[in-house]
Image (cartoon, rainbow, N blue to C red):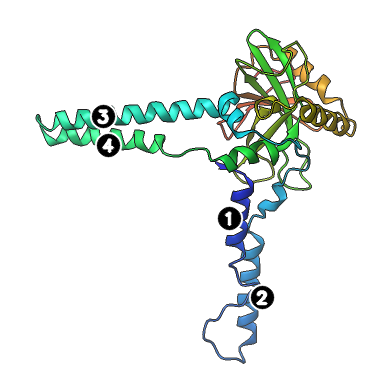
Amino acid sequence: MIRLSVNSKKELSRGADQIPGDGRIFIGIERDNHKEIENCQNQKKDEEIKVVDYSQFEASTKSGIHADVNRIRQKDEIIRAVVKKRRNSAITCVCFVCMAGISLLKGWIPALICILIALFFLWRAVGKFSDEYLRELYEEGLLVPGMIVKTEPLTIMAIANMVAQEGAAAVNGCYCLEVKELDGAKKELFEKIPCSCFFCYEGGKYHSSFQPHPLCWGTMDQQEIGEALRQVEEDNRENSKDEWEVLKEIAQKFPDLGNGNMILLDENYVPFGKKNYMDSNYQALNQQGEPF
């Protein structure tokens, strides 16, 4: 699963630039064998066409805020949950290393098993969120509309266009996010909460999922958040249907959607699928909005 960011797009673009621009392949054949050379050139050009241009995933509308990294580390519950899992994995890794040392007294096989388990948890514990990535998440991500659809537990639903390739039929995703706190928000039912998001892309015409990050997690500047909300309102006027009303309808139709789950909508905003954001495939829904 590829988490797209500005840095990743630069790296991928740098890799694509290493392909010869004129499509030539030198294979040591005679000069007068023009046909074979031409075939090789065409084959190389076909390979170049298959290179994914990740610049197409640049957010069309960004939040415009100046993200506060310290605030993000304190308030962003999605980031904090990942950090907590990594910390727990690190502690578990240390425990299994200690158990491996004790197991050596009984034999090498139990010790080897403990070492293998320790390596697994070490792999899960590795990695951290850089300041640059956290800024990009809020400043370079796509600005999308979000709304409080439940106050107990406090739940946000956000909607985003899942189309990854130009020309594909419109598909929107409604993401359900349960949160503990929204510092700076009134926390009222149907309060509008602008969010920034990155998408997960696994190939094909559509992104596989996204996660919304409320802007109030990234800045305490209410003026910047207000300007972002006005931008969302302006973009919403161009839609065939009011997406604020769509969020209300989906929340009422799927009251038990659950944290991290998504409802997929067709170009007419009719629900046709349900999935968890970690899954690649979705579960089809019938006309009543229930799984087949």
Residue closer to the observer: 27 or 75? 75
- Say which label, 1 or 4, has the lower sequence index: 1
Residue at (45% x, 39% y) in the render: 127
Badge 4, how many Cα within 10 Å: few under 14, some, many 20+? Answer: some
Q: CA distance from mark 2 to mark 1?
A: 22 Å
Tell me the quarter of the picture where residue 93 sits.
top left
Q: Is residue 89 above or below residue 147?
A: below
Judged from the image, the secondary structure of the residue bearing numbered disc 4 is helix
Residue under circle 1? Answer: 11
Residue under circle 3? Answer: 96
Residue closer to the observer: 16 or 36? 16
Quadrant showing the C terminus: top right
Residue at (65% x, 7% y) in the render: 152
Residue under circle 2? Answer: 22
Kindly check if marks 4 and 3 are in contact, taking CB atoms under 8 A apart as contact: no
Q: Is residue 23 above or below residue 95?
A: below
Badge 2, how many Cα within 10 Å: few under 14, some, many 20+? Answer: few
In x, y percent, where is residue 60? 78, 43
Q: CA distance from mark 1 to mark 4?
A: 32 Å
Viewer-nearest of discs 2 and 1: 1
Query: Mark 4 belongs to which amino acid?
Result: Leu
Kindly check if marks 2 and 1 are in contact, taking CB atoms under 8 A apart as contact: no
Badge 3, how many Cα within 10 Å: few under 14, some, many 20+? Answer: many
Tell me the quarter of the picture where residue 105 sits.
top left
Judged from the image, the secondary structure of the residue bearing numbered disc 2 is loop
